[in-house]
Amino acid sequence: MTDPAMQLLRPEYLDATGLKVTNPADGSEVATIRSYNGAELTGIVDRAEAARHEWAARTAKERSDVLRAWYNLMCIEADALARLMTLESGKPLDEARGEVKYAAAFVEWFSEEARRAYGEVIPPHAAGKRIVTLRQPVGTCAAITPWNFPLAMITRKVGPALAAGCSIVVKPAALTPLSALALENLAHQAGVPQDLFRVAPAIRSSEAGDVFCTHPMVRKISFTGSTEVGKVIMAKAADQVKRLSLELGGNAPFIVFDDADLDSAVDGAMASRFRNAGQTCVCANRFLVQAGVHDAFVERLTARVAALQVGDGVENPSGMGPLISDKDANRVADLVKEAEAQGASKAGKAPAIPEQGAFHAPLVLTGVTTDMAIAHEEIFGPVAPVIRFTDESEAMRIANDTPFGLAAYVYTADFARQWRVMEGLEYGMVGVNDGLISTEVAPFGGVKESGFGREGSSHGLAEYMNIKYCLIGGLER
């Protein structure tokens, strides 16, 4: 506990025999924390269920005020939260600070949305009757979150749950539980009842998932992670017809047409592909570039990639950090080697990377074709595969030829084409002439095998509420 950021962790979070958290930049141990087994998780869910009734009975303003206090504490502790995130995930400090701000924005947004959970008065179908709808909390919820955005993936689930009047138990990623625990600590300091919102790290993730899927008091599960695991959760939760929100895998196309502003497109490509070392769900996974600007785009993108500084996230706060683990770095390297064996080529010279740590050099691959694995698998690393296309119809065919449908990007100056492509892309989110689409004010989520449900915006609050229809009769004069 020598690092000041570790002071955000309460002593009871630590356990020398528990879950070991390491820094992917150098493999050093950051902390060892308590891990919960299935029986302990069951007890946590039981207490969350008991706590939710009093919380739901509070006024919307009272819940709003508590969430606002939590947001304020996150802002006060922003630097410490960012440093803690960098220590456990390797994310450069500047990116970590940006995520803290992004994560806090969800708490702020839903503190305000708590007061706007409006019902309806519907014109009746017969005389002497009135129809109203009420929005009521779903109940006790569970969330399973990934390691790539260890704060934001939690606040955009917990924020609306608490705003709606629900309780929620979070199983964070085993690789990055420290940020989650710090977040819980600040929430409790702000006045969120301790049993209402709990963070429960678990070495055996499948055991935690089984508890959430089978406990009769868990009314809703929100999961962000792989499509494979999402399907397992969906199947196991079916027995009790639990409500689900699933944000799963992606294969985002980034389409650049001949008439695009290339400088803007390259800026968007850098933001979309290389942020967090390419480890984001909405990363541009395939660059589809029209033949007329292909070479110019590759030249400009390669120059920008070559200028990236790669290293430890603390010592290199504005550069690019490591991948989350050696295993992940090796997986990306294997994808690149396979693509090269099939005819792809590295463009330009890649930046130097440290000898120690889970690093992979950022690079651009040209000559990529649609039959290569790297064009279909979610890379989750700092590699930009470029596919050449000839016309709009070919671009749309390639872009939609995937079972996934989370995010897509298109760069074109043609207003009519913007609308055609935007409407034709089979994705839950589309960025037009912009590579950064995530914001708390808009609904985040995918279609097809990228899942369903939305996070952020008023739609995010609705995911944690049931609509109750009430018919009042006997009102004849």
Image (cartoon, rainbow, N blue to C red):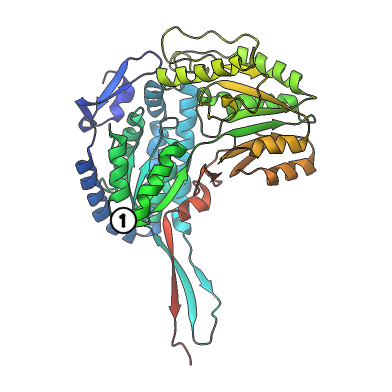
Q: Is residue 32 visible?
A: yes
Question: Residue 392 appears in which quarter of the rendering?
Answer: top right
x then y, percent, for residue 429: 60, 42
Q: Residue furthest bottom?
A: 477
Question: Residue 300 appears in which quarter of the rendering?
Answer: top right
Query: SS for tag 1?
Result: helix
Residue at 57% from the left image edge and 25% from the top image edge: 374
Establish if 338 lies above or below 389: above
x then y, percent, for residue 405: 57, 41
The residue type indicated by label 1 comes to: Trp
Residue at 55% from the left image edge and 38% from the top image edge: 438
Establish if 309 lies above or below 255: above
Q: Work out whether residue 133 or residue 346 is closer to the camera in this orientation and state it.
A: 346
What is the quadrant of the N terminus in the image?
top left
x then y, percent, for residue 280: 51, 30
Left or right of 37 on screen, residue 137: right
x then y, percent, for residue 23: 36, 19
Question: Residue 90 appears in which quarter of the rendering?
Answer: top left
Q: Work out whether residue 189 or residue 122 is closer to the camera in this orientation and state it.
A: 122
Left or right of 442 on screen, residue 218: left
Left or right of 203 on screen, residue 255: right
Q: Is residue 199 visible?
A: no
Q: Work out whether residue 374 or residue 86 is closer to the camera in this orientation and state it.
A: 374
Q: Label 1 belongs to which residue?
A: 55
